[in-house]
Image (cartoon, rainbow, N blue to C red):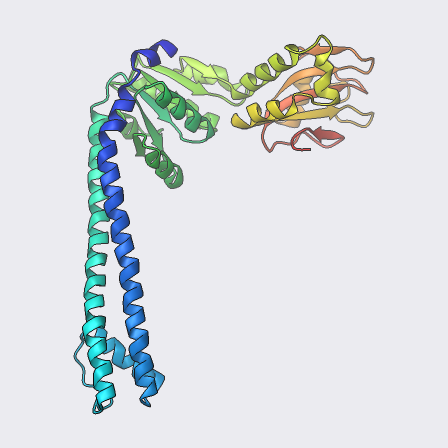
Amino acid sequence: MQQFVGRMAGKQVETNRRSAPLRSWTKRLLSSSVRNLVLGALFVLTVSGIAMAGYIVAGWSVWDAVYMVVITVFTVGYDEIRPVNTPFLRADTIFLIVLGCTGMIFQTGALIQFITITQFQQLFGTRRMKNDIDALTNHIIICGYGRIGLMLAQELATNGARFVILERSDRRFAEARDAGFLCIQSDASEETALLTAGIDRARCLATVLPDDAVNVFIALTARSLSPTIEIIARGEAATTESKLRLAGATRVVMPTQIGAERIAQMILAGEPGAVQAPIRGMGARRESEEVLADLGLSLHRLVVVPESPYRGLTLAEAEQRAGISMIVVALKSQDGDTVDQPPLDTRLHVGDVALFIGREGQRLAPIRMRTNARG
């Protein structure tokens, strides 16, 4: 993958550089139309307020003053509900006609400019993006712009790789577009979406959605459309890996497993006795939490007490009974011995303390489970 990214270095950056002047020009023009709208509205409101005050001072009711200002500013041409027969009233009306009508004409022009520019921006922006996607070859398709998808897109862009993102959510699609990435708002599990993204010309597809079932379906659909494409799939549950490979995934990435390995490296990189530190005091706590948070994971500690439902169970049985995916990083027994990354057939006894990684927001069960996240 790194070699592939290296061969394509600079191409995505070049595409963004070509479209940057147009985006900058459109942004300046759009901001000027918004500014004109605001200034025009303030001008019309100020003139209208002064004219209304003049009519009220002349003895008109507030409603009559408002009505007179509205029909004058919008040039409707109805007859005055009260005679304008004094020098003061005539001067006030002339003031309103000259400045109020001029301001309204300016405001109307600014509104038309704003609407026109917005429509042209959407039209040309969509057409330009479609043309850029159609011109891609040997590119990468990213399915999903969540936490992992965002990190992947940023890393690929930094290394100059060319890619296109498939995202169904309105908010995330807008975020990807605003970031300057080529993106298509569509369901990545649909054949039409993958074909629009150029799967027949793509070198690699990465499906990184948090839903294992959807990732399996995307891998299956992508493999049927392109028998030779490299498919890298994200998996959450350990049992999903085999399903993803059967569906056609070339490689399967397990964020939970990656997080566990990274934490284990931090633990083992310390002093000889440092493996107990995470269980006692979490000396590398802040750095560990930052790494895990990027992957949507969190670090927990479980103390096995006599009434614990996990007493006497193996780690595999405890995971199955809890109904969550977890990776045990270290297990400290009651006699003080600590085992790094213990095997799944290790049994839990009273007094054991297990340090494990699970998805953020998961809770293991009930009895004396302590979460080492943020205090």
Q: Quadrant of residue 98?
A: bottom left
Residue drawn at point x = 69 percent, y = 33 percent: 375
Name the outermost residue toward the left: 77
Residue drawn at point x = 76 percent, y = 31 percent: 367
Can residue 1 be seen in the rendering of this structure? no
Task: From the viewer's side, name the closer residue of 286 and 253.
Answer: 286
x then y, percent, for residue 301: 70, 25
Task: From the viewer's side, name the closer residue of 319 and 103.
Answer: 103
How many numbered tags mark residues here? 0
x then y, percent, for residue 284: 65, 21
Task: From the viewer's side, name the closer residue of 346 and 341.
Answer: 341
Q: Answer above or below: position of 364 versus 24.
A: above
Q: Quadrant of residue 219?
A: top left
Q: Quadrant of the N terminus?
A: top left
Q: Answer above or below: position of 157 versus 120.
A: above
Residue drawn at point x = 70 percent, y = 10 percent: 271
Q: Quadrant of residue 275?
A: top right
Horizontal side, residue 27 vs residue 230: left or right: left
Can residue 262 be seen in the rendering of this structure? yes
x then y, percent, for residue 339: 71, 10
Horizontal side, residue 360 vs residue 113: left or right: right
x then y, percent, for residue 342: 68, 11
Horizontal side, residue 110 vs residue 366: left or right: left
Task: From the viewer's side, name the closer residue of 17 and 254.
Answer: 17
Residue drawn at point x = 58 percent, y = 14 percent: 261
